[in-house]
Image (cartoon, helix red, strand yellow):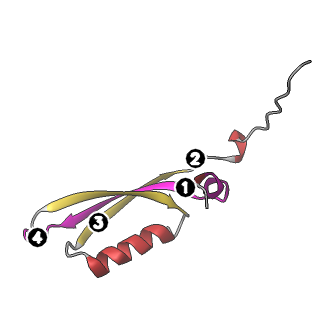
Amino acid sequence: MSEFKQMLDGYRLVTAEILYRMPDHPTLLQSYLWQHYDLEPKYPELQRFLDFWDRELEGPIHSVQVATRRLISPSEMRRADFYTVH
């Protein structure tokens, strides 16, 4: 699905800051930024990524902060007719 079609279907650009513990130094936190188009309020794409992280990566997640903004809203959609005057 194209990004434009996703935006029209209600997807939003979601940014998540994931703080996780370093496997060799558990007292240290490292930051990872994830960004993808996703649906509120359940964020299925982010949930799939976090499930993958838990299953495949060694650094346990400490916390996740999510920021999102709707990129296209109905008031921003305007029809424009372009034509050539002869």
Q: Which residue is mark 1?
A: 12
Q: Is residue 56 left or right of residue 22?
A: right
User: Residue 35 shows which numbered tag?
Assistant: none
Q: Say which amino acid is labelled 3.
A: Ser
Q: Is residue 33 magenta?
A: no
Counting from the top left corner in percent of width and height, residue 86 is at 92, 18
Q: Which residue is mark 2?
A: 71
Q: Which residue is mark 3?
A: 63
Q: Say which amino acid is labelled 4.
A: Pro
Are the two marked residues, 3 and 4, in contact with CB atoms closer than 8 angstroms?
A: no
Measure the alpha-carbon separation of dots 3 and 4: 14 Å
Kindly identify the residue that appears in the image at 61 percent across and 62 percent down.
Answer: 1
The residue tagged with tag 1: helix, strand or loop?
A: strand
**Is 23 above or below relative to 64?**
below
Q: Residue furthest bottom?
A: 55
Measure the alpha-carbon separation of dots 1 and 2: 6 Å
